Image (cartoon, grey):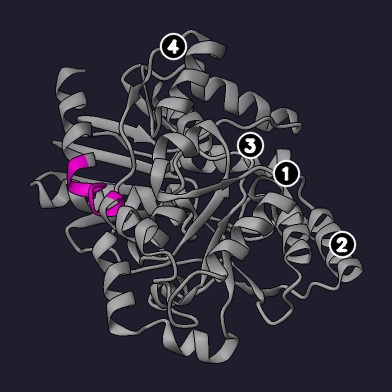
């Protein structure tokens, strides 16, 4: 098959990680794959190398000072629509921006779209983009049953459900090779959150949980953070609350892809307090590294992680779960502080392969 996958960014966000890994799995299966992406800020490549078997088409989105979010959304859609060319058997958008661009370029008939999670937007242009990208595409895919249930309830559509894969071996190797040791030498035993500082990631409550934990010798590290949106007011609120509570988060920002497995493997606890998720790929990577996972008690995360995670619902319960892990048996700084959860978590992560996800997609394409 000639397959086009489209994603809104070149940065290491979950949907972009998904797009590249799925594309490479399609290529391994013998298909001709092209990944289209919006490239902002002068980017000329994805955040990591992409196998040469996958064709990459980046559409530049030059920065415009003072541009509103709504105008940037509309301009991004128009730029990708103008650049996108046909000749594909399957066109599959991974977000609402690229779905709208394809719809503008060639219509929504025959378009596949993955709904990774559902959001509520206040920017009118983005709210309309989100709505069209659920209502108009010919076929929908969701990465969990919980998100599919939201789509059924809210829009009366019946999506297919195909879970994410995970490069479990990469994160397992980092743990086995001691790649986390330099991070532990620098920061000691640390709580790690990946995804940056934004409302959906629950960062404010995570800061409050660290204060409730009351262990200043255990720092909070926050990695990642590239996004379409301006979260500066929320960041200011988080830092103000942290200062008020005496918490000093270590904000790493985007971490080089080659260094990420070591950072994850070195964590004593992986914190995942997101208020909205479709699957939880970063948390699954932590499980692959054998790191104890404490996540918010959401239906989707119960569905995906089950017995492999510890669940919490507010800062106090997050703090209790952090303390339970930190006080477990084992060597300080070793992720094997909770052997039962680590074993279950590694097995769960290993069961989610990108080749299996690609095979499930290909079966849908052939039927559709």
Q: Position of residue 66 (x, y in %)?
A: 80, 54
Foreground label between 1 and 2: 2
Discs 3, 2 touching: Cβ within 8 Å = no
Residue drawn at 36 percent across, 48 percent down: 18
**Closer to the camera in the image, 96 or 166:** 166
Q: Quadrant of residue 164?
A: top left
Q: Is residue 271 above or below residue 104?
A: below
Alpha-carbon span between mark 2 and mark 4: 41 Å
Instruction: Confirm whether the magenta stretch covers residue 248.
Output: no
Asked which secondary structure carries label 2, the reply is helix
Q: Position of residue 4 (x, y in %)?
A: 28, 40
Which residue range is magenta in the image? Answer: 348-356
Instruction: Confirm whether the magenta stretch covers residue 352.
Output: yes
Asked which secondary structure carries label 1, the reply is helix
Residue drawn at 44 percent across, 41 percent down: 279
Quarter holding the N terminus is: top left
Mark 2 or mark 4: whose residue is earlier in sequence: 4
Q: Which residue is most to the left?
A: 30
Alpha-carbon span between mark 3 and mark 2: 35 Å
Q: Which residue is mark 2?
A: 241
Label 4 crowd bin: few (<14), some (14–19), many (20+), radius 10 Å: some
Q: Which residue is mark 1?
A: 69
Numbered circle sitting on residue 329: none
Discs 3, 1 touching: Cβ within 8 Å = no
Q: Which residue is mark 4?
A: 157
């Amino acid at each position: 098959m000639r397959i086009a996958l489209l994603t809104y960014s070149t940065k290491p966000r979950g949907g972009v990680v998904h797009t590249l890994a799925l594309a490479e799995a399609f290529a391994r299966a013998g298909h001709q794959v092209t990944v289209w992406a919006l490239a902002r800020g002068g980017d000329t490549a994805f955040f990591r190398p992409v196998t040469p078997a996958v064709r990459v088409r980046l559409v530049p989105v030059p920065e415009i000072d003072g541009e509103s979010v709504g105008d940037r959304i509309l301009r991004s859609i128009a730029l990708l629509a103008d650049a996108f060319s046909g000749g594909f058997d399957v066109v599959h958008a991974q977000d609402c921006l690229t779905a709208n661009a394809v719809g503008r370029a060639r219509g929504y008939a025959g378009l596949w779209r993955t709904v990774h999670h559902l959001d509520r937007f206040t920017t009118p242009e983005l709210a309309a983009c989100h709505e069209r990208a659920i209502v108009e595409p010919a076929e929908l895919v969701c990465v969990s049953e919980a998100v599919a249930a939201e789509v059924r309830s809210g829009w009366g559509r019946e999506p297919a459900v195909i879970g994410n894969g995970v490069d479990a071996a990469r994160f397992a190797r980092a743990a086995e090779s001691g790649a986390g040791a330099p991070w532990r030498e620098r920061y000691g035993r640390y709580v790690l959150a990946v995804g940056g500082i934004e409302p959906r990631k629950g960062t404010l409550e995570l800061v409050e949980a660290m204060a409730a934990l009351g262990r200043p010798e255990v720092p909070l590290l926050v990695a990642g953070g590239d996004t379409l949106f301006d979260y500066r007011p929320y960041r200011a609120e988080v830092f103000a609350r942290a200062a008020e509570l005496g918490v000093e988060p270590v904000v790493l920002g985007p971490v080089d892809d080659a260094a990420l497995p070591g950072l994850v493997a070195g964590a004593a606890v992986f914190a995942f307090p997101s208020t909205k998720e479709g699957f939880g790929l970063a948390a699954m990577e932590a499980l692959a590294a054998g790191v104890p996972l404490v996540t918010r008690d959401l239906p989707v995360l119960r569905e995906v992680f089950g017995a492999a995670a510890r669940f919490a619902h507010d800062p106090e319960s997050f703090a209790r779960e952090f303390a339970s892990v930190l006080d477990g048996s084992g060597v300080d700084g070793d992720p094997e502080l909770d052997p039962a959860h680590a074993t279950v978590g590694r097995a769960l992560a290993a069961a989610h392969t990108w080749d299996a996800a690609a095979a499930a997609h290909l079966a849908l394409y052939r039927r559709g």
